[in-house]
Image (cartoon, coloured by chain):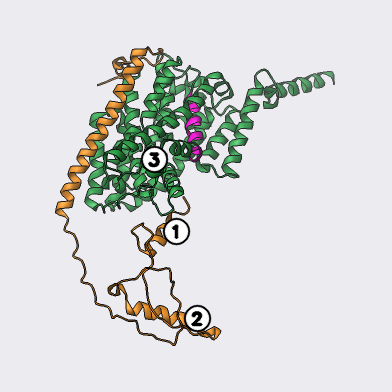
Amino acid sequence: MGGVLDFFTNTLGGLWSDSGIHALFAEGGWKNLIMILVSFVFMYLAIAKGFEPLLLLPISFGMLLTNLPMAGLYHPDLWVLVDGHVNYGEVLKEGGLLDILYLGVKLQIYPPLIFLGIGCMTDFSPLIANPKSFLLGAAAQGGIFFTFVVAGLLGFTAAEAGSIAIIGGADGPTAIYVSTRLLTGGGAITTGNIALAAYTYMALVPIIQPPIMKALTSKKERSVKMEQLRTVSKTEKIIFPIAVTIIVSLLVPSAAPLVGMLMFGNLLKESGVAARLIDTAQNALMNIITIFLGVSVGATTKADQIINIKFGGVMLLGVIAFSLGTACGLIFGKIMYKVTGGKVNPLIGSAGVSAVPMAARISQKVGAETDPTNFLLMHAMGPNVAGVIGSAVAAGVLLSVIG
Amino acid sequence: MFSYPVMLADKVLRGTEKLTGTEIISMTLIGLSVVFCALLILVVFLCCSGGFFKKTTVPPKAAPKKEAPKSAPAKAPVKAAVPKAAAPASAAEDDSEVIAVIMAAISAMGAAEGKQYQLRSVRQVSRGGSGRSVWAQAGVLDATRPF
């Protein structure tokens, strides 16, 4: 009888020490608890407030799953480089579900596929009709490079500075693509940190941008009504993605996966002969990739890697990057306002940060606040989609220079 | 055939190393220059191709304007009700048939209540400086209000 009792208590003790509840209250378990609470906050924001629910829900649930102790869905130690390489055999053998899904992030498969879907859904007509919009899209990338300066001066390594700076591109897939390539494991900053900051600030674009837009422009500038855009022919729309792919890929080959897939998606759309492929790329494929990307990026937010001072630095520099990008676009917009004799409304410059179509909506909203009869939406879409190409080029530059 | 380590060796900045002042400034200048150059080339390309397509595209001929009658036929006995804060309209833009149909609808609506309306004049409503017609203005407002 005594033996049975001993066996029972030992087994029960073993079960208890292997349980997540025990780990939650063991040393360092409080960090997991905090991250679980943070995931609840994100879920609340997604469900109750409707903040980017398609992304925030998968990310927050991935965050919850990865921070449940002992669940073993994601193992950061499997992704640490050994002799400069990830041991993918070990990942397949020992990895959990989220490790396997994370392969698509680590091998840079998901971001270009997301770009394929975005390409299928994007109309580049406003940009083709007003090519000068490209310059506003380029100017807004100043946020990336000026943040690189700040991060560098604060003592971040080249890879960390590049990954933080790309948050200023206001483009989630690009930020994930760059940070996965640059942050090869072992450091305090992870792809999860960068993605979390990027998506948080993208959701906060309506709060971050308007005060900067109002501070940097006068009422007279904000009330400029722009000329109606010309109609773009179908041939121009078909040539555009092919030309952009060739020009950008020849100039910055590192940007080819992102720009190439974006333009491939757009060519499918504009060609008008691949309805089934467009349907798949912008619906089923996009949705599947969004789920995989969201959950696996959420999984990288392990408590140990998030709750540290460097993540605070990432969040701070992230908002600086967004603000600088907005300011650079607006300042270039003001220059164009002067050069064209008041024909360009500087507000469309802030849409040069990617964040499609949110940034263009904000330009429209702030313009309409000054003059309700002013409609800037289509004019702002030009710099907005130019910003997507611009941030992909900037990402290519970072990847080419930093190793 | 490139291998990953060879590509890494070609990079200017080592990812794991901290940045010096010179590297930071150089990287910023190079980055901004490359982005501007790449997009400037696209601007030049689009301007050239846009100019080419504008030349080759023949603008559609404007449809000849119909001469509208000077006064609209009153389809029903009526007693006036067109907004007074409107600007005078050119008779050429009036479409007598459309006006007649709209008046018929108004008359039918009034008939149910025992009221009668009379059409005295048709005036163009101010475009409010936007350059759009009232219907275009309403359409744009409807499409952009959610933003």
In reply to whether residue A194 is colored magenta, the answer given is: yes
Question: The numbered mark 2 sits on a residue in which chain?
Answer: B
Any part of residue A65 in sight: yes
**Picture disc at residue A351:** 3
Question: The numbered mark 3 sits on a residue in which chain?
Answer: A
Question: The numbered mark 1 sits on a residue in which chain?
Answer: B
- Closest to the observer: A85 or B20? B20
**Badge 2 or badge 1: first in the primary sequence:** 2
Task: Name the residue located 41 percent from the left edge and 17 percent from the top edge.
Answer: A152
Task: Name the residue located 26 percent from the left edge and 52 percent from the top edge.
Answer: A230
What is the drawing colour of chain A? green
Amino acid type assigned to the residue bearing label 1 in the image: Asp
**Picture disc at residue A228:** none
**Picture disc at residue B142:** 1
Provide the residue span drawn in magenta.
A190-207
Label 2: few (<14), some (14–19) or many (≥20) C-alpha neighbours in 10 Å: few
Instruction: Specify whether disc 3 shares its chain with disc 2.
Output: no
Task: Name the residue located 34 percent from the left edge and 80 percent from the top edge.
Answer: B97
Location of the N terminus of chain A by quadrant is top right
- Closest to the observer: A172 or A274? A172
Spatial separation of the CA atoms under disc 1 and disc 3: 22 Å
Residue picked out by circle 2 = B109
Spatial separation of the CA atoms under disc 2 and disc 1: 26 Å
Vertical arrangement, residue A31 with respect to residue B20, above or below: below
